[in-house]
Amino acid sequence: MRPMILTSILFAGFSLLAASCDNETILRGNDNPPAIQSDLDQTTGYFSSTEAAKCDLFYKPAIGYVGDPMPFYDPQAKDFKILYLQDMRDGNSVVYHPIHQLVTTDGASYQSLGETIACGSAAEDDPAIGTGSTVYDEATKTYHTFYTGHKSASPREVILCATSSDCKSWTKDRSFRLQAPGNYNVDEFRDPHVFYDEDAQIYRMLLSAIRDGRSVIAQFTSSDLRKWNEVDPFFYTKWNRFYECPDVFKMGDYWYMIYSDKDVTRNVQYFYAPTLQGLMSMGDDPAFPHLFEGKLEGLSFYAGKTAGDGMNRHLWGWCATRAGNTNEKTTDWAGALVAHKLVQHADGTLGLTYPDAVYTTCKQAVALTEMSKSEGVTGNASTGYQLNAGQSVRFARLQYVNKVEMKITTTPGTSVFGVSLVDCSDRNYKYGLYIEDRWDNLKFDKVTTLDEGDEERANINSKQFIHAADGVYQVTVVSDHSVCVVYINGQYAFTNRIYGMQRNPWGIFCSDGSITVSDLKYTVK
């Protein structure tokens, strides 16, 4: 019976495909989702495109989502291993978040190794797993991944360890168990980050914790990765905020601590100092050391941690999905994996730009088709545009993996401009990525056109930045299905989840002041 049923199903499927091809041709290449070539490309109405559950530029497993990444540069294989918490969203509130593993050399293409550290049983310390980190012990030729074991009963969180000889197959070391000391909250004791301090010749383990009622980055030291001694906290957090996913490293002449602020800003942020001791002492100062509290990203990028190969250091985090696949609704936990390249400035401050391989992924040039523009707009896609307040240009539909580049020139500190997405002629709303040169803000807004013609903006995500002193902005927009990252001047990254971008029109606008658009390029994967 099975062969007959299968034949019937296949016949029905081919019949449906043949029927659909009467109106449009579906082309597939390079394992991308269907690229539809038809009269659709000559229209600007809304097209509903299903987000593909597949590996693409910003990695998402075929089933489930990427939770907190734990990147590690493997000194033996000379590649990056990205361990992460696999979020299945299957409703299991007891056993969840096994560790899966990816391999990449460039932050743009990933090989999945599948599940590498399984959850324990409900009776063990790790029915649920939380963030951790990996180190390689040259003396024993052994990889150690320290991670959080989480369960409902108190002590709710403990630190556990798994080992491997090849960074592929892992064995849990059930003889290792680090529980919070007596003056710590035994239920908030997680996210171990282990690194080797060359100067002190010891390993340091940092933990997100609460000590004597105060949020701290706890610290333990070890000479052999097995016996750990409690020492003074590494960092006293500002205003009792709880810092998750700590990551400490040296880059050039500075030491950095990157963390995710759980309770207040929900941002990935950082502190830095010329020495490790100086970094540790910054927690005693009630003021933040530099502008905007060292915020690296907006609200849709979380749990960022880094790994470096001696030449470049990248920051991996997850771009959240949103409830109901609706842009304006609340962010879910986990999503797609996004990598940025860290940029270090002479004064020690950090910026973000695209990894080289992310930039070169989209290399197929596509001619820009102008669909409409406001009255009074001068220029074209080849020569550039001059836009004044209230003017815009709409272009033909994006594909699935896109890169849009442009140079924007304005009088410094005077203009508001950006890129519109899901910019369809049959809807009274669209989405805008705003570069507020005038107000030093990056914003992702829903923009609704009211009956009287005015526009109403509702903010979804925002990030402060410092406007370009010369008024020149090199803007690169990289999108992959519903994940979009705007890179500005090799210094700022702004990640957002924007459903409906793929296969819908987009545009450029100016809502305040005036701008000149030049060097406009559009490439796809």
Image: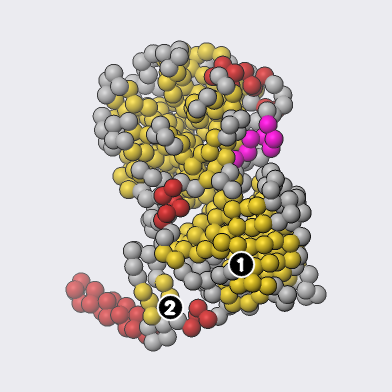
Which residue sits furthest right? 452
Q: First in sequence: mark 1 or mark 2?
A: 2
Identify the residue position indicated by label 1 in the image: 384
Query: Label 1, label 2: how many angstroms apart (C-alpha)?
Result: 27 Å
Visible in this render: residue 107? Answer: yes
- Locate residue 330 relative to residue 453 in the image: left or right: left
Identify the residue position indicated by label 2 in the image: 37
Q: Position of residue 499 (x, y in %)?
A: 55, 62
Residue visible at 54% across and 19% down?
276
- Locate residue 195 relative to residue 408 in the image: left or right: left
Looking at the image, residue 233 lies above or below residue 511: above
Residue visible at 59% across and 45% down?
492
Q: Give the residue type that dot 2 points to.
A: Gln
Quadrant where the N terminus sits is bottom left
Which residue sits furthest front? 383
Q: Nearer the viewer, residue 12 or 65?
A: 65
Q: How dense is the environment of label 1, judged by Cα within 10 Å: few (below 14), some, or many (20 and up)?
A: some
Q: Nearer the viewer, residue 344 or 173?
A: 344
Q: How dense is the environment of label 2, judged by Cα within 10 Å: few (below 14), some, or many (20 and up)?
A: few
Give the magenta part as a residue range.
290-296
* Residue 107 shown in magenta: no
* Discs 1, 2 touching: Cβ within 8 Å: no
- Locate residue 470 relative to residue 244 in the image: left or right: right
**The residue tagged with tag 1: helix, strand or loop?**
strand
The tag on residue 349 is none
**The residue tagged with tag 2: helix, strand or loop?**
strand
Q: Nearer the viewer, residue 84 or 363?
A: 363
Visible in this render: residue 261? Answer: no
Q: Position of residue 411 (x, y in %)?
A: 74, 54
Residue visible at 46% across and 39% down?
314
